[in-house]
Image (cartoon, helix red, strand yellow):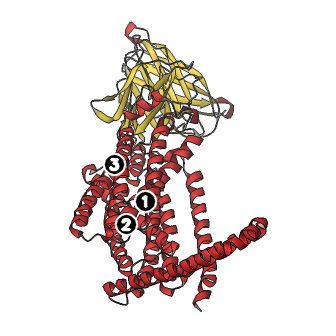
Amino acid sequence: MTSRTPSVTRPATRRLLSVCGALLAALLCALSFGASPAAAHAALTMTDPADGAVVKTAPAQVRLTFSEGVLLSRDSVRILDPKSNRVDTGNPAHVGGKSSTAAVGLRPGLPNGTYTVAWKVVSEDSHPVAGAFTFSIGAPSKTKAKVPSDAGADGTVETLYDIVRYVAYGGFAALVGGCVFAGLCRSSRAVQKLAVGGWVALFSATLLLLLLRGPYTNGEGIGRVFDLGGLGDVLSTKPGAALLSRLLLLGAAALFLAVLFGSYARRAADEDQGRRQDLAFGLAFGGTVLSVGIAATWAMAEHASVGIQSKVAMPVDVVHLLAVGVWLGGLGALVATLRTGEPIGRSAVHRFSRLAFGSVVVLVLTGVYQSWRQVGSWDALTGTEYGRWLLVKVGLVAVLIAIASVSRRWTGRLVDEPDDKADEKADEKADEKTEKNADKKATEDEERTEDSDKTAEGTAADPVRTAQLARQKAAVDKATTLRARYGDLARGSLYRSVLAETVVAVVLLAVATQLSTTQPGRAASAVASAKDGGTAADTSPTVDPISVEIPYNTGPKSGRGKAIFMLDPALPGDNLIHVFTFDLADRPVNAAEVKVTLTLPKKNIGPLSVPLEHVATGHWSAKSFQLPMGGTWRLSLTVRTSDIDQVTETRTLKIGQ
C-alpha cells in the first residue's frame, strides 16, 4: 500500500503546481503590462508660474514644488521657447534647502510667447518621474516644443529593472531564510544550495540594478548600461549608495556562508560542544548584523525613507523585511529538504513551525503600521492603485496563513512522540539503514567484481544494454526518492502543503515588488487634494483659447494704455473671463470703470453684458459667464479713466469654430 503512494499523490501535486503556476503567470502579466508611469512617487503639486499662466513680464526663474523630496541632475528642468530652443541658465537647485523644490533661472529679455517647461526628477524613494507644462509671457503663441508626456523610460530597461528588483527580493528571502533554517532547524545540502543560490541571485541582481540605474532614471536605452560616467553619477545618489553598500555587505555574507556550511556544519558531531556553541554565538551575531544591514539598504532608499515618521518607519521596514525573509525563505528551505527525501528530525520541523508563527506575528504588526503610514485613509485604500495592490497582498497573506494552518496540523502529527526519543529512534534507524546499505553494496561490489571480466566485452559491445541499465538505475533512484518523500502519509502531506505555501509566497513577493513601485495612497490622495484645491503658486489666469490685446486711449496722457481680454474655454456654455489693464510702461493700472459686452449679430443675440468684478490692481474677472452658442461674436470693451474720459473698442471673436 505504501509503495503506491507516490503514483497516487504525484498527479495531485502536478495539478497544484499547474494552478499556482497559472496564477503566478497571470499576476506577472498584470504587473508587467498594467504598470504605468503614473505609478511614480513624487508628484508635481505647484509651479511658479502656474501651468498655463500668462505673465506680463518674464520671471527671473521657474520654480517647481513636489509632493516629496526629489533628486536633481543637470537636465532635471529644461525651458524651451516657442522655437524649441533652451532658454534656461545654470543647473537646477533646491529652493531654501527644501528637497521637495526645484528652480532654474531664465535668460533675461525673453520675448512674448508660450514657453514649455520639461522636467525629469527622481523621487527620494528612488523612482523617476517626469512631465511638462507651459506658461506664456505677454500672450500665448504657437510653439514647436515637443516633450514626452510620460516618464520617458525606455521600455526594455524599465521591464528588465522591475524583473531584477523582484529577483533581488527573492534572493534576499532565500538567503536569510535558508541561513536561519540551517542554524536553528537543520542544515543539509539542499538548504545550502538554497542559501547560496539566494546569495548569488541577490548579488547578481544588485549589480544589475546598479548598472541599470542610470539608463532607468534618465530614460536611456539598454546600450547605456555600461556607461562608466553614468555609473559615477548613480553612485553619488542615495539609491546608488544603498546598492553599493549592499554589494559590500554581500561580500561579508559570502564569508558567513562559508563558515555556516563549512566549519559549523563539520563540528555538529564534535564532543567539544563548548567550541561549537561559541561558533554558533558568533554566527548568530554576525548573521544578525549582516541581515539587518542588507535589509536597511532597501529601507534607506525606498518608501520608508520618505513621508511621515521616517525615523520610525525605517527600522520597522527592516524588521518587516527580516520577518518576510525568515518565513518565506524558511518555507523554501523546508520544501527543498522534504523534496530530496532526506531524513529530517521531527523536532526540527516543529522548531520551524514556531519560528514561522513568530515571523507571521511580526509581519502582521509591522504591516499594519506600514499600511496606516502609506495609505492614511479608508478612501485611499480602495480609491488608489497602492491601496488596491495592498488589498491583494493582504488577501494573499490570508491564503498563506490558511495553508500554513494546514501545515501546522501535519507538523503536529509528526511529533506524536517526545522529540528527543523520536530523534534518537530516527537516528538509530538511519544508522541501521546505512549499515545495511553498506553491507549490501559491499556484497554487490564483490559480485560485480567477479562478473566484470565476463560481462565487460558484452557490455562494451552492446551499447543498447548499457543505456537500458542506466535508465533502470535512474528509475530506481527516482522511485527511492519518491518513496522517501511520499512513503509516510504525514510527511507527504506536509510536503504538499508547504509546497503550496511556497508557490503562494512567490506570488506574494511579486505583489510586494509592485507595491514598492507604486505611489503610496497617502501621497496620491494629497496630490489629488492639492489639485482640487487649486494650489497654483501664481494667481494669473490660465492660458485661454482666446486672448486679445486691445490698445485704448481715452484722451489725456494718463488715459493711454492697453487691455488684455481673455476667454476660457471660448466654447458655448460656462466660460471664465479676465480683463487686465496696463499703462504704457506695462504696469498694472486701475481704471475708473471697465465694461464688456458680447454680441452675436447673425443670430440677433446681445449685447450680453459681462458682470465683471474688480479682483486686483488692473484685474477684472467674471468667474461664470454663459455663452448660448458658438459663432462670430463682437466684443465691445469700454474703459473709463475719469468722469468724462472713456473709450469703447471692438474686436471680432470666433468662438466654438
Rendered residue at 59%/77% (across/down)? 446
* Extreme-bottom residue of the structure: 1
Q: Given the image, on which type of amino acid does mark 3 rest? A: Ala
User: Can you tell which quarter of the image residue 472 is in?
Assistant: bottom right
| Amino acid type for the residue under numbered disc 2 | Ala
The reply to whether dot 1 and dot 2 touch (C-beta < 8 Å) is yes
Q: Disc 1 and disc 2: Cα gap in Å?
A: 9 Å
Mark 3 and mark 2 residues within 8 Å of each other at the beta carbon: no
Q: Can you tell which mark lies on residue 252?
A: 3
Q: Outermost residue, top direction? A: 557
From what the image shows, is residue 169 above or below residue 447? above
Residue 51 placement (x, y as % from top left) = 46, 32
Q: Which residue has dot 2 on it?
A: 182
Q: Which residue is mark 1?
A: 195
Packing grade of label 2 (10 A; few <14, some 14-19, many >=20) is many
Q: Amino acid at mark 1?
A: Ala
